[in-house]
Amino acid sequence: MAALSARLRRWTYLTHRWCGIAGCLLMGLWFASGMVMLFVGYPKLTPWDRVQALPALAAGHYLAPSQVLGGQPASRLVLNAATGSPRYVLRRGDGSLASIDAGSGALQARFDADAALRAARLFRPGAAVHDEGSVQEDRWTHSGALNPHRPLHLIQMDDPARTLLYVSSSTGEIVMQAPRTQRLWNFAGAWLHWLYVVKNQPVDPVWTWTVIVLSAGCVLVACSGIVVGIWRWRFSRPYKSGSRSPFAPGWMRWHHLLGLGFAAITLTWIFSGLMSMNPLDIFSARQRPDLARYAGAAPGQRYLEAAPERILQALERDDFHAVELEWKNLAGSPFVLARDAHDRSRLVTEDGGRLVVAPQWPQDMLQQAAASLMAAPVTDVEVLHAYDAYYYRRDPEAMMGGSARRLPVLKVSFDDPGRTQVYIDIATGQVELGADRAQRIGRWLFSFLHSWDLRGMLDAGWIREAVLIAFSLGGLALSASGVIIGWRRLRKKTAVKAVKTA
């Protein structure tokens, strides 16, 4: 037993000593880039930025949805003027997109650079625009949600932020914006933090497993460091030097002290980063909400048949100036979801031939429709007027900062094996979040441990940021000391080998 303990002890020392050289270098990179990400987010186009740039839909003659759909299967139908003139955007059953002129019905299969320039001028009025060619994918456009829009036109704006816009070749609309300062900081932030240097496509198993293996290795390094640090610390009586650390003043002692002081937060952040990759799909939902059954019909099967000009007139009477109309269904009942430039919404339904405009759904109707989301009984229904631990909003800089997450929201709990909880926006009827037990555990092991994103923490503002920066600097110092010690050890080993072979 003593021999086994000695071998285990030796291997723990060796693991930390040699794996720590590369591990500390990687962890130092993660700490430094994480501090940047706290203040500069990954480029994105938020829902409110998108609708803010859309021109208002003026009352006039538009083709009816029936003329646009023509009986073809469609999962989404939207009317806006993102390209300068009203057009329908149709998402077909296979996921591809089509843009159809709302006046003539002409199908525009592809949008060229000139169309992209027109869309950019609408997005940033008054700024000069320049065509920078097109790209299938680059470092800012890995998201799989952009696949139907590829290739993407690149338009450089001469606005103060030197914004780079990405325009869909399928619909002619802006799908991404990336200001110059944000792009530059992201080279030291998210691009490094997520190791996007080795990612080549939206779904990249090589990148996924590279991050998982490296994160797991760093967890091992951190754990071995904690064990070694505790073994070497004298709790009962100090060493002859008077210190409780056996190391002489210098980098080794600093590494020991920093390790004991910041090992827990280092391990927590590396472990939670590993959990963000959802290794082996351990946090994936076993049963997801059935959105098709919740809708009851796709726009290609059933839709509000009122003419668009009638819908716009009804909205104007309600003092609502729509920039976008979307044809949807709730439990088989057709309606139109209207949005304005301030990201507010209205529901348009038909009752006995009369159009009704409402700011939100009646709770009983929404609750009845929600029951069809899961093949399990509803156990609890609650209207939330404040955020909880799972449904909450983050600043735009955060990874989830592009989610609107409006209030009030209907929270519906189900008695399925995963005890799924679903959050439905009462104003739109859209399912904003669904989380079963595995996903909720993932939320705590990743988002909470990695971002400290409980409501009270987020409300603390600069205090939370200051604490995160302080811990990050401690972790960076710990990692830097490990790199220096490792580099010196490697140089010494190399010098000894050179002498022996001379």
Image (tube, rainbow, N blue to C red):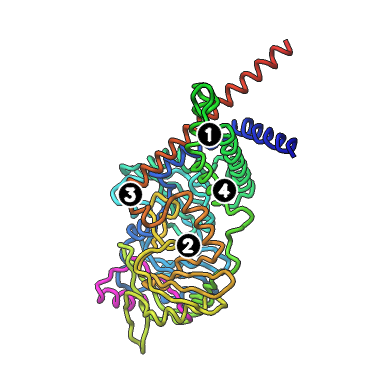
Closer to the chain start, of discs 4 and 2, is 2
Q: Give the number of callouts.
A: 4
Report the residue marked by disc 2: 108
- Report x, y in % for residue 408: 35, 69
Report the residue marked by disc 4: 274
- Distance from label 4 to label 1 (Cα)? 36 Å
Q: Is residue 313 left or right of residue 43?
A: left
- Distance from label 3 to label 4 (Cα)? 26 Å
One can see residue 70 in this view: no
Q: Which amino acid, mark 2?
A: Gln
Where the N terminus falls, by quadrant? top right
Residue located at (32% from left, 61% from top): 55
SS at badge 3: loop
Report the residue marked by disc 3: 461
Q: Is residue 130 left or right of residue 226?
A: left
Q: Nearer the viewer, mark 2 or mark 1?
A: 1
The image's mark for residue 236 is: 1
Closer to the chain start, of discs 3 and 2, is 2
Q: Which amino acid, mark 1?
A: Ser
